[in-house]
Image (cartoon, rainbow, N blue to C red):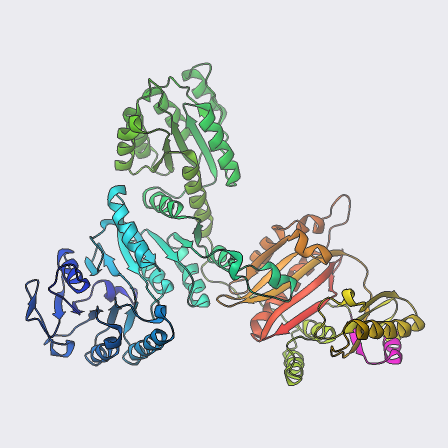
């Protein structure tokens, strides 16, 4: 049982700030509690009233002669601290703080919210809010909110960061005939967050689908852990607002520049098994689909239509959503041919023609649903003069009973003439839309969830040997001691080498003679690079020399680099020149890491070299929950994968070595939270092995 089960079915509830005045929030909450059918005891609290709505009123919580399990606060923010303290002393387990005036109002409100949370923690009280509408559970039942009404009973839990969204969706749901198990308004999420309620809904036997509207995530690691486990039990569908790039972080590396403000959320949802809705209609279309239809066994979709145009639209959308048009067996095709008019299309999409009545739809649908190659079906009905919308809808309802394991959707593409048919479908729990696209989107979401549900909830962490933690700690210590945030190339190469990543040998030289001696030791040819934490783009200031194959060229190159840098950037601190063994060319890749504020380190992989920001052929994964399978997937998502497999006669590259570099970079990022960004560009992938060339690391 969820630790929040008592919040939805408390034995008793005190409504603090209860009011006799109709229209006041304190009065609405009392009436809602009574009218919801709540089975526990309700104690209005107001020092000025002897009774409210027929219930005895108490001056304060500590004057109530019986234990109080939950308290709903609707009082001025400034009084909330004192009241919460009394509630804590009286053993109240749950606070629902309706009151606004906390962190949403600014600095002073934030301080009040912190104090309120401190009191809750001190007395081990769980708090919903503040600044929330409250909560509702149709099965408990309870309505501890100031909403105008109570939801229809159903199996959808709706968790919303926006109180206005709760009120709007509740009002809309009556007209749509949509039932809910729970409504939760999160408010400021000072204590209980979306993750706590997702976890609760996953354990709730009355909830079949979990919907969320969120603007941010409070605790990224907790969210990922909860969402990963919950999504293996029930569909978790989230609409996340605030997706613009305006909030993208400023970053010095290629990886950071490619990671926009919404990318970490997109990656987090995908890795944890959350289905992301792009808008409000899609959120509730998916909810209706999951609540009323079985999970499809695969991605093969059949379309039955009485008009060619809509059939083509549906087909295009199926391919766009990366679903497949079902291929019928020879028996199905022959059965359709024997019954349908000669002009009908008997292949998918099946066109029963504009003069089709209910019997023709019935036969085509029954034949198609019996085909073992069909995982789901969509029926499109256009209102021709002879169309029988009600009878056709009844035929679909009958097929829904005969084939309960196959999802069935409808698009009744019209208005007034099709309304009665829509009503029949709604009563039969067959999702019905005006156009094909929402039906296909719903099927796509269900197919995605079918894949997610079978994945393990427990993640086996990546494990590697040959890791030298002492070298990394010592190198980072020296960098911090030097008051730097950017590592020199030689230091960065040393760190990734300590984690078992093959890197081009790189050493720091402070004079032409030392550079030449190092080049002799490394072997020719070599590359020279200016060593300065302030210079990101070395070639722009003449700070790079490549292909040097003699002592004389190395000595001369050293002096030319120093002259160039002093001329272009006279005031920049220079530590010397790095001498690097020049490696043979391979497939150029980028492997990087940037640290997201909510979800932690985010790993990037894709085509590298000078075109990385132009082509943006990059895939991302969070280190949290990263597996070998996920790394394989992120490699396969890119165009770089085509080159790695061998393009136009080229030998395939060593993908296993690339996979290990990604895994070891992820391990490094997880082990050292002070590392803010890693950029390895390029990594050269060879037929055997791979090597990191240019490594940039910054710390926080």
- At a point 43% along the width and 62% down the height, the residue shown is 216
* Quadrant of residue 363 within the rendered picture: top left
Residue 349 in the image, given as x and y percentages of width and height: 47, 27
Determine whether, in the image, residue 476 is placed left or right of residue 223: right
- Up the image or down, 655 lies above or below 406; here it is below
Quarter of the image where the C terminus is located: bottom right
- At a point 9% along the width and 76% down the height, the residue shown is 65
Q: Is residue 501 visible?
A: no
Q: Is 645 or 35 nearer to us in this picture?
A: 35
Give the farthest residue toward the top. Answer: 342
Q: Is residue 521 visible?
A: yes
Determine whether, in the image, residue 690 is placed left or right of residue 207: right
- At a point 27% along the width and 56% down the height, the residue shown is 182
Residue 436 in the image, given as x and y percentages of width and height: 42, 34
- Up the image or down, 145 lies above or below 385; here it is below
Q: Is 8 or 646 nearer to us in this picture?
A: 8
Residue 183 in the image, given as x and y percentages of width and height: 28, 56
Q: Which residues are magenta?
A: 505-519
Answer whether residue 499 is magenta in the image: no
Answer whether residue 511 is magenta in the image: yes
Q: Is 307 or 556 nearer to us in this picture?
A: 556
- At a point 21% along the width and 68% down the height, the residue shown is 74
Determine whether, in the image, residue 154 is placed left or right of residue 343: left
Quarter of the image where the N terminus is located: bottom left
Determine whether, in the image, residue 268 is placed left or right of residue 169: right
* Quadrant of residue 140 within the rendered picture: bottom left
Residue 266 in the image, given as x and y percentages of width and height: 50, 56
Give the farthest residue toward the bottom. Answer: 481
């Amino acid at each position: 049982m969820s630790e929040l089960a008592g919040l939805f079915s408390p034995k008793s509830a005190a409504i603090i700030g209860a009011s006799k005045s109709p229209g006041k929030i304190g009065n609405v909450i009392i009436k809602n509690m009574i009218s919801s059918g709540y089975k526990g005891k309700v104690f209005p609290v107001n020092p000025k009233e002897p009774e409210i709505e027929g219930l005895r009123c108490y001056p304060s919580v500590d004057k109530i002669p019986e234990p109080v399990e939950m308290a709903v606060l609707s009082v001025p923010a400034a009084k909330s601290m004192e009241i919460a303290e009394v509630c804590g002393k009286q053993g109240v387990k749950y606070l629902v703080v309706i009151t606004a005036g906390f962190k949403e109002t600014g600095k002073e409100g934030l301080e009040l919210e912190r104090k309120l949370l401190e009191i809750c923690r001190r007395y081990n009280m769980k708090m919903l809010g503040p600044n929330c509408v409250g909560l509702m559970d149709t099965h408990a039942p309870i309505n501890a909110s100031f909403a105008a009404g109570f939801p229809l009973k159903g199996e959808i839990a709706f968790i919303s960061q926006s109180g206005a969204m709760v009120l709007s969706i509740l009002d809309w749901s009556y007209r749509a005939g949509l039932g809910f198990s729970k409504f939760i308004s999160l408010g400021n999420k000072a204590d209980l967050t979306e993750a706590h309620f997702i976890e609760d809904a996953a354990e709730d036997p009355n909830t079949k689908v979990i919907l969320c509207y969120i603007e941010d995530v409070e605790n990224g690691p907790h969210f990922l852990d909860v969402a990963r486990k919950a999504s293996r039990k029930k569909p978790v569908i989230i609409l996340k607002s605030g997706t613009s790039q305006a909030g993208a972080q400023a970053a010095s590396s290629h990886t950071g520049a490619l990671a926009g403000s919404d990318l970490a959320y997109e990656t987090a949802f995908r890795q944890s098994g959350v289905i992301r809705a792009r808008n409000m209609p899609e959120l509730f279309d998916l909810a209706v689909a999951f609540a009323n239809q079985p999970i499809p066994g695969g991605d093969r979709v059949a379309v039955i239509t009485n008009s060619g145009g809509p059939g083509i639209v549906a087909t295009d959308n199926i391919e766009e959503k990366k679903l497949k048009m079902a291929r019928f067996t020879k028996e199905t095709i022959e059965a359709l041919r024997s019954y349908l008019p000669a002009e009908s299309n008997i292949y998918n999409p099946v066109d029963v023609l504009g003069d089709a009545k209910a019997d023709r739809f019935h036969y085509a649908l029954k034949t198609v649903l019996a085909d073992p190659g069909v995982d789901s079906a969509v029926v499109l009905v256009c209102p021709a003069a002879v169309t029988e919308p009600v009878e056709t809808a009844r035929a679909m309802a009958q097929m829904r009973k005969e084939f309960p394991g196959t999802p069935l959707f409808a698009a009744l593409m019209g208005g007034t003439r099709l309304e009665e048919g829509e009503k029949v479908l709604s009563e039969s729990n067959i999702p019905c839309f005006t156009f094909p696209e929402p039906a296909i989107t719903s099927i796509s979401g269900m197919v995605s969830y079918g894949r997610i549900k079978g994945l393990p909830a427990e993640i086996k962490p990546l494990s590697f040997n040959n890791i030298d933690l002492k070298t990394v700690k010592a190198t980072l210590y020296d960098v911090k001691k030097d008051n730097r945030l950017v590592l020199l190339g030689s230091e960065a190469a040393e760190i990734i080498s300590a984690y078992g990543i093959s890197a081009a040998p790189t050493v720091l030289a402070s004079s032409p003679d030392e550079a030449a001696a190092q080049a002799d030791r490394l072997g020719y040819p070599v590359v020279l690079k200016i060593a300065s934490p302030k210079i990101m783009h070395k070639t722009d200031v003449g700070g790079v020399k490549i292909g040097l194959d003699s002592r004389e060229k190395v000595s001369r190159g050293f002096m030319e680099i120093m002259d160039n840098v002093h001329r272009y950037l006279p005031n920049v601190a220079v530590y010397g020149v790095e001498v690097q063994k020049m490696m043979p060319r391979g497939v150029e890749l980028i492997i990087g890491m940037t640290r997201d504020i909510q979800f932690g380190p985010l790993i990037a992989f894709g085509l590298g070299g000078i075109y990385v920001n132009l082509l943006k052929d990059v895939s991302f994964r969070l280190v949290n929950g990263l597996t070998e399978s996920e790394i394989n997937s992120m490699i396969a998502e890119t165009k770089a994968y085509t080159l790695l497999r061998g393009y136009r006669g080229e030998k395939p590259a060593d993908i296993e070595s690339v996979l290990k570099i990604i895994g070891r970079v992820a391990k490094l990022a997880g082990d050292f939270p002070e590392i803010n960004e890693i950029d390895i560009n390029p990594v050269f992938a060879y037929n055997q092995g791979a090597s990191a060339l240019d490594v940039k690391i910054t710390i926080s």
